[in-house]
Image: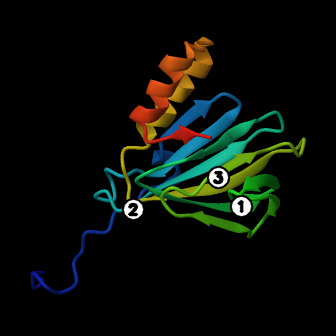
Amino acid sequence: MTLPVDGPNTDGAFRSAAGIPTLQVGSTTARLVATGAQTEGRYGLFRWDMSAASGGASPHYHRSISESFYVLDGRIALYDGIDWRDGTAGDFLYLPPGGVHAFRNDSGAPASMLILFAPGPPREAYFQELAERIASGHKGSDEERAAFLARHDQYEV
């Protein structure tokens, strides 16, 4: 079937659950549902499954991407730049570029959320490097940590 250039296309991409790459980031399982490379840089979507012992991310911002959090299960503390809020299933938080945010699981129970960022830079590189640093116990100097974060458009406040 030939479709017109300016009409609909058949470029959809199905991925079975078994085909979604998984990263272990400390005690969190990250499922890379859609990477920036797969969406032509439009967005990235990760599922973040936090164990009862999971920490989270300290307050930070990104200069070039927005980030959104959608709680699937459990209770996740979400920081919107002003207040910490208890996010439960169905709650959503959006941060534009430059928006300070953070999250943590201090509920004592497992929790899951979707993290959407747009546009879709290769954010998985940040999480892969973070996973390696956590697994190896590598802390590095303050300067090294700041360079690592800046390389991935992440700035702590």
Q: Which residue is mark 2?
A: 14
Q: Which residue is mark 3?
A: 101
What type is the residue that disc 2 sits on? Phe
Mark earlier in primary sequence (2, 3): 2
Q: Which residue is mark 1?
A: 71
What type is the residue that disc 3 sits on? His
Residue shown at 68% from the left, 68% from the top: 92
The crowding category of the residue bearing disc 3, from other C-alpha atoms within 10 Å (few below 14, some 14 to 19, many at least 20), is: many
Element on which disc 2 rests: loop
Mark earlier in primary sequence (2, 1): 2
- Colouring method of the image: rainbow
The crowding category of the residue bearing disc 2, from other C-alpha atoms within 10 Å (few below 14, some 14 to 19, many at least 20), is: few
Q: Residue 153's quadrant in the figure?
A: top left
Say which quadrant the N terminus sits in.
bottom left
Q: Residue 134's quadrant in the figure?
A: top right
Circles 2 and 3, Cβ within 8 Å, touching? The answer is: no
